[in-house]
Image: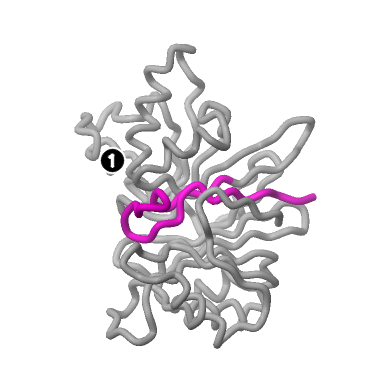
Amino acid sequence: MSMRLTVVGCSGSYPGPESPASCYLVEAEHEGRTWSILLDLGNGALGALHRYVDPLAVDAVFLSHLHADHCIDMTSYYVLRKYHPDGEQVPLPVWGPRRTSRRLARAYDLPKKPGMREEFVFHRHRPDAPPVQLGPFSVQPVAVEHPVEAYGLRIAVGDRVLAYSGDTGPCAGLDRIAEGADLFLVEASFLGSADNPPSLHLTGAEAAEAAARGGAARVLLTHVPPWHDPEVVLAEARTAYDGPMELAVAGSVHEV
């Protein structure tokens, strides 16, 4: 069995001129149909998502953390699901950090109750629990280092593994996410030449070092902010990993 990753948005920290902020569509065939999940839904991503899938056909959303560039288009998704002319939708399962429902309700100026609970069914990431099973997907959250509660995700379909770092600094959780991955989708927001704050993001070299330690088969660098030259980030990363590596580009499709 395999899965297909479509980069809906890959711009770091805010939408850029070439891409929305973070959003990744993962699809796999199972029981006669295509199942689809979203990893994050950042600024500008919902509009672009229409190019690749009917937003009403998505089976679940997994939010790595609650910074706007990873979650804020959930407010627009709420509008789409609530007021779509096709009528009432079955509530969509959403996994995220604690208080995800409260954060999104506040972002759209809704009362805490019901907030968005009539459109979404919210579940909290539980890294110590067994993986979430959804159709062909097995999804395991792993806690990582970031200023807010944040997770990377390991998505398995059969024996194939897509590893997603979310936003993180170097940490044991990042190494666990990368271990044995067929494709490691990893953020690379910082330049090694800069004086970067700790426990916030990765340089290209740090992302590549995690991939090398974990034995990841392929690397896809993402979340490069518009103020950096992605080719510089890629060049730094190539010094620490000699396997297949490329930059995420909005609209690109990757078989896992």
Q: Quadrant of residue 58?
A: top right
Q: Quadrant of residue 77?
A: top left
- The reply to whether the magenta stretch includes residue 2 is yes
Q: Which secondary structure is most common in the magenta stretch? A: loop
Residue at position x 28%, y 40% in the image: 102
155 or 196: nearer the viewer: 196
199 or 211: nearer the viewer: 211
At mark 1, the secondary structure is: helix
Please give left or right for residue 155 compared with residue 192 in the image.
right
For label 1, the crowd category at 10 Å Cα-Cα, with few meaning under 14, some 14 to 19 and many 20 or more, is: some
Q: Position of residue 179 (x, y in %)?
A: 64, 73
- The reply to whether the magenta stretch includes residue 186 is no
Residue at position x 54%, y 51% in the image: 7
Q: Position of residue 197 (x, y in %)?
A: 28, 79
- The residue range painted magenta reads 1-25
Q: Position of residue 158 (x, y in %)?
A: 77, 53
- Tell me which amino acid carries mark 1: Arg
The residue indicated by pointer 1 is 102
Q: Quadrant of the C terminus?
A: bottom right
240 or 67: nearer the viewer: 240
